[in-house]
Image (cartoon, rainbow, N blue to C red):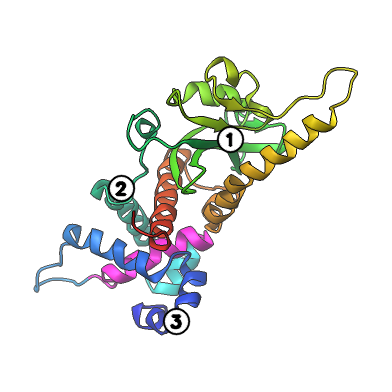
Amino acid sequence: MIDTTIAQRLTDKQFKRRFGVQRATFKAMLKALQPEWRTPPKPGAKPKLDLNDRILVALEYWREYRTYFHISTNWGISESTVCRIVHWVEDTLMRTGQFRLPGKQQLVRGFGTPSVVIVDVTETRIERPKRRQRAFYSGKQKGHTLKSQLVIDAQTQQVICTFFGKGRRHDFKLFKASSIHFHPSTESLQDKGYQGMQKLHVHCRLPKKKPRGGKLTAEDKAYNRQLARERVGVEHINRRLKVFRILSGRYRNRRKRFGLRCNLIAALYNFELSLTQPAS
């Protein structure tokens, strides 16, 4: 059985590998949840897991994405208890407001608006739906997926906002459905999936498309390579988010909680990124 004592014996590097977050992030989560945690009265049955263990259960579920059965056998509790713990940790962390993304309003504010943003979409496979399967089928992934749109600050590498859609929806249509607007002075970087973006935002940079029946010039190829170098940061962020296998593996849960979990994990990534950046 795993408990907080065993987790404390791990080095900082081992703790990060085991649970997906730094020890400082775990302590911040504990501090945020402490006011919401009500210790049971002395008479009556006591819960098997305290608040520290409950956070570790949720982190283990996101990190490894094993079934409730496997996690319950590790901690000596029932499957339903694991489910309730994970949901309580997720909902309570979001309710505290300490682990939230800046939001799309950050993109249009006059002060603190990012100068360069990167827009990209990543896909997560899901179980084949029983109904309306075609809406979730992604031709690119050759399977049923959920799409996650990320808007990244190119300078700080922080996730500003997200939006989600079904696998069949085109990337540019997903962007228009998100109702995201950029400040006129903000420059946005996109891939070829956002053709037509120049009609919505003047300061956008798209890769040069090869003309029909022709070839790209040497200047166009150099431009595309330079744009790819500037956009590669979003791929690194996707990799860091998908350290949690709940986002990288085949998503088995109900789809209505996918957005909440993705936002929460992105907020945890932002928090850890703020720990390494010097205070301004």
- Using the image, tell me which numbered label, if any, was put on residue 129: 1
Left or right? Give the position of 70 relative to 95.
Answer: right
Q: Can residue 132 be seen in this snapshot?
A: no
Mark sitting earlier along the chain (1/2): 2
- Residue 58 position within the rendered picture, expressed as x and y whole percent measured from the top left: 39, 61
Q: Which residue is mark 3?
A: 10
Q: Nearer the viewer, mark 1 or mark 2?
A: 2
The magenta region covers 47-68
Among the 4 quarters of the image, the one containing residue 44: bottom left
Q: Nearer the viewer, residue 127 or 60?
A: 60
Residues under labels 1 and 2: Cα distance?
28 Å
Left or right? Give the position of 167 relative to 181.
Answer: right
Q: Can residue 175 be seen in this snapshot?
A: yes
Residue ID at (89%, 20%): 214
Circle 3: residue type: Leu
Q: Is residue 33 above or below residue 99?
A: below
Mark sitting earlier along the chain (3/2): 3
